[in-house]
Image (spheres, rainbow, N blue to C red):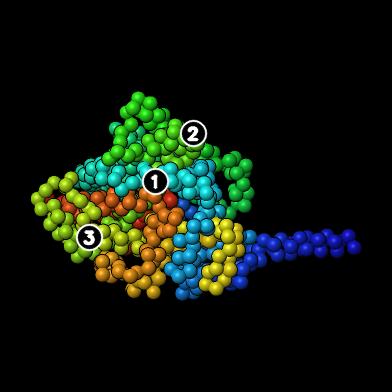
Amino acid sequence: MFVALLIVLPLTALFLAWFYLFRNNTDIPVSPGAKPIVGHMHHFMDISRETLYLFEERYFKITDPAKAGPVSHMKFFFKSNFSLNTVKVAQPLLKSNVNVDKSFQYDDAAEWLADSVLILPGKEWHKRRLMLTPAFHFSILDDFSQTMKKHAGIFVDIIRSDPTKPLTQSIEEATFYSLCETSFGVEFSSQEESNAFLAPMESLAQALFVKSSSQNPLIRFDWYFSRTENGKLYKSSLNALNGQIMKLIQNAKTAMERGETKLHNGRRGFIDQMVFEQADKKELTDEQIIGECNTILLAGHATTTGTIAFCIYYLCRHPDVQERLFEEISEHLAGKEFDDIDVTSLSYLGMVVKETLRLQPPGSIIGRRLTEPMEADGHILPAGTNIDISIWWLHRDPEYWEDAEKFDPERFTEENSRGRNPYAYVPFSAGPRNCLGQRFANIEARLFIAALVYNFKMSSDQVLGQGLFRTIHNVSAVPGPNFKVDFETRY
């Protein structure tokens, strides 16, 4: 009898665990490729930092709407995760004013991006967004564009002087310098100064990747992770980065106290806006300002880096597009200096960048956690469900994009864009939780691309999927590893 109990009780416990933790909580069938207990997790267990490109490759294979349907259902141990893969099913969630909370995937970064607009839930997020919005007003960009042009020029000079330097690294440094001077009012006088920010950011991203991809279930618990080598690296890097940011905050406070805050067309830059809100409304803590600064530092240059790098790739693959773009820029400048360029008036440049963002959005997935049930493709997803909105598949929805894998800027002519569903193209998300900095990113990307095309003919024999891959670097996609381009000076 005792022996029978020893057998029956564990089996009963396992059954109950499966019933409550592993069973489907909707009638959406689990997507192909799942195994018992682990679900789809086995597809990602062998991925290392060097093969990080495999994550998206395999994720897209599992969620392919041609096989998995408009709503795919993935299992990761006891968690169900759903991906919305067509414009029709994703639009209600994108435009929702209620289901705006971020999904569990953002939890690992909660300490790094603490209480920031990126991860705050519901009402707190809405209040913080209103607070930040003045720092991203379009009138500020008129002033910022001159600083961006300066850094685009420096970037061109770097390529002239050292064309062998890793291209993605050069783009990252240039966009980071531009962001820091515009939004934080700091100019770096040496690479060592900028590395005080970039190095710990890279270490933080590396440590979080190890945590999220580890096969050790204990790594999910902070008390265990903090005692591992990567956990210690994470903590030391976070302390180092936060210490640097706190210096910027103190400088901004000192400038405000002295009445020396620099205004941009009558408006404050990002960090000055935060410091002003803290002094005026007594609601923000230094820790919350640090969290917002971390978010802007990370996302503000990483997304632009990926956009510029992929745009260079497509221009190399399509020299006819590159030459047409050069002609547009040359005609626009008509002998004037590059500093006189107005990239918002260059329609073909805008089309090229948009098509790049369609094919290679900096972030391929937006994560949400439902606070209220929602309907998707005839299925009811309950509150608490984690959902991915697949920008990758929305940008390839055959209802809106014919021959979707083809690079064709003509998709974005005024005529071809007329009447297109606005949720078919969402590189910076859409609806109430869209990206605050998308205007900034668009202007900067266009300026850097214009500077490159105006000064160089670019070529490369590398092909995505053949030794060159879309991979993740500092939360944004870039072509790698070792993206190489030949630059032939035009002048």
Tag on residue 282? Answer: 2
Quadrant for the N terminus, please.
bottom right
Residue 452 in view here = no
* Label 3 element class: helix
Question: What's under tag 3, amino acid-wise?
Answer: Ser
Q: Which residue is mark 3?
A: 347
In the visual, does 293 lie left or right of 224? left
Disc 1 on helix, strand or loop?
helix
Q: CA distance from mark 3 to mark 1?
A: 27 Å
Q: Considering only vertical position in the picture, is 418 above or below 198?
A: below
Q: Quick check: 234 above or below 354?
A: above
Front residue of 223/427: it is 427
Q: Which residue is mark 1?
A: 133
Q: Is residue 320 visible?
A: yes
Position of residue 185 in the picture relative to residue 333 (left or right): right
Callout 1, which amino acid?
Thr
User: Which numbered circle lies on residue 306?
Assistant: none
Q: Amino acid at mark 2?
A: Lys
Residues 90 and 273: in front is 273
Q: Position of residue 258 (x, y in %)?
A: 35, 25
Query: In the image as oriented, which residue stretches furthest toward the top?
Result: 258
Q: Secondary structure at mark 2?
A: loop
- Badge 3: residue crowd in 10 Å (few <14, some 14–19, many ≥20): some
The Cα–Cα distance between marks 1 and 2, rounded to whole angstroms, is 18 Å
| Position in image of residue 167 (x %, y %) | 29, 50
* Earlier sequence position, callout 1 versus callout 2: 1
Task: Please give the name of the residue rendered at 47% of the width and 40% of the height, measured from the top-left corner.
Answer: 291
Dot in front, 2 or 3: 2
Label 2 and label 3: CA atoms lie apart by 44 Å
